[in-house]
Image: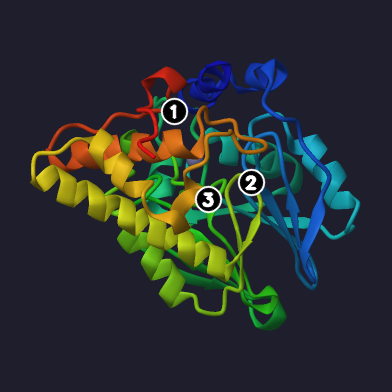
């Protein structure tokens, strides 16, 4: 339950984030190469992506607050080029937390999807306001040739502003938290997230970005296009099973039993927390949470934000 408390502090406290790091969020890790000029820095919040262009550097996401210096130390181990731009995948403070450092010290342009930009810039909200310089709605291309970046938005999921960031020369797509830890994702209804909308959104990402051979998750590792497709299929199945079960008056518990009867989905139904997992719970716990969220949405009830779930509240396996 401690993990649950920590991430709640990140998501809901905003300002309490630096303290949360001290309390046990995994620290920043060493930069690793993902493509020819593309790198990932794990830890201290969501993955930060480093794209080294001809003349400068673009970052995707900036972790929790207070990580600017540590991020720069990692970036400087691979390039001396100036930091020109920060792209944010969505509005959560474990992805935009150190934006201020790069605005103040590197005069970066901050780019975000319009719904995310509105949430980031809202004054007096749950999180400190965070300026955005450039917004896009459904698509935007940044740069040319080998420096090209493509930004896509296909609808709601984790939030209502989840951007997919494509690096065509590296055949690699950055998915943000709609795809985290290769399990069903956290749904944040307070930020416009929706489990019922998610399958359409991620299916669109799969088919509209066919050149993405590698997919980097918002937290956790780097996956193949095939792994991403099997995850898309699992989430489609989760919602379909929720719909069918709800329609005949069944429960999320029954839906969970049906979901785990599909052998090929066992990888998304594990009982162990995944490495670096700050959002409390296990893949199976998250699947059960998302069945409950889907049921709430189907019943027209207000879906709840559930950071995690105690093991004792997850129904026992049927088989
Ligand atoms: Zn998030």
Q: Earlier in the sequence, mark 1 or mark 2?
A: 2
The disc at residue 220 is 2
User: How packed is label 3: few (under 14 Cα within 10 Å), some, or many (20 or more)?
Assistant: some
Q: Is residue 296 visible?
A: yes
User: How packed is label 1: few (under 14 Cα within 10 Å), some, or many (20 or more)?
Assistant: many
For residue 30, side relative to residue 217 (left or right)? right
Contact between labelled residues 3 and 2, with CB atoms less than 8 Å apart: no
Relative vertical location of residue 39 with respect to residue 273 in this rendering, above or below: below
Contact between labelled residues 3 and 1, with CB atoms less than 8 Å apart: no
**Ligand 1 near label 1 (Cβ, under 8 Å)?**
no
- Horizontal and vertical percent for residue 309? 42, 24
- Horizontal and vertical percent for residue 217? 58, 53
Could you say whether the residue bearing mark 2 is in a helix, strand or loop?
loop
Could you say whether the residue bearing mark 1 is in a helix, strand or loop?
loop
Q: Earlier in the sequence, mark 1 or mark 3?
A: 3
Q: Residue at x 57, y 46 (%)?
A: 181
Observer-nearest of 230 and 318: 318
Relative vertical location of residue 8 with respect to residue 98 in this rendering, above or below: above
Q: What residue sits right under mark 1 in the picture?
A: 307
Cα distance, mark 1 to mark 2? 17 Å
Q: Earlier in the sequence, mark 2 or mark 3?
A: 2
Relative vertical location of residue 1 with respect to residue 252 in this rendering, above or below: above
- Horizontal and vertical percent for residue 8? 49, 22
Q: State which mark lies toward you, 1 or 3.
A: 3
Q: What residue sits right under mark 3 in the picture?
A: 267
The disc at residue 151 is none
For residue 36, side relative to residue 9 (left or right)? right
């Amino acid at each position: 339950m401690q993990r649950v408390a920590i991430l709640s502090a990140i998501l809901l406290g905003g300002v309490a984030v630096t303290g949360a790091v001290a309390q046990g969020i995994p620290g920043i890790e060493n930069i690793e190469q993902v493509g020819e000029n593309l790198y990932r820095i794990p830890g201290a919040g969501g993955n930060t992506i480093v794209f080294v262009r001809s003349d400068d550097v673009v970052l995707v996401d900036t972790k929790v607050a207070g990580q600017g210096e540590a991020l720069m130390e990692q970036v400087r181990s691979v390039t001396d080029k100036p930091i020109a731009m920060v792209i944010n995948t969505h509005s959560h403070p474990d992805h935009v937390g150190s934006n201020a450092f790069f605005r103040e010290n590197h005069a970066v342009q901050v780019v975000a999807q319009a719904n995310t930009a509105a949430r980031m810039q809202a004054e007096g909200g749950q999180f400190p306001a965070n300026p955005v310089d450039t917004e896009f709605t459904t698509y935007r291309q940044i740069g040319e040739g080998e420096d090209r970046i493509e930004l896509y938005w296909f609808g709601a999921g984790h939030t209502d502003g989840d951007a997919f960031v494509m690096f065509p020369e590296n055949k690699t797509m950055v998915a943000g938290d709609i795809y985290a830890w290769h399990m069903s994702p956290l749904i944040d209804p307070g930020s416009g997230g929706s489990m019922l909308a998610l399958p359409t959104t991620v299916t669109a990402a799969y088919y509209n970005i066919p050149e993405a051979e590698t997919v980097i998750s918002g937290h956790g590792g780097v996956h193949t296009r095939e792994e991403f497709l099997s995850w898309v299929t699992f989430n489609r199945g989760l919602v379909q099973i929720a719909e069918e079960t709800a329609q005949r008056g069944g429960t999320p518990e029954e839906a969970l039993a049906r979901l785990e009867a599909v052998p090929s989905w066992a990888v998304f139904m594990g009982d162990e927390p995944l490495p670096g997992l700050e959002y409390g719970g296990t893949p199976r716990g998250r699947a059960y949470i998302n069945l409950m969220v889907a049921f709430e949405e189907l019943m027209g009830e207000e879906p709840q934000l559930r950071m995690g779930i105690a093991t004792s509240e997850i129904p026992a396996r049927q088989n």
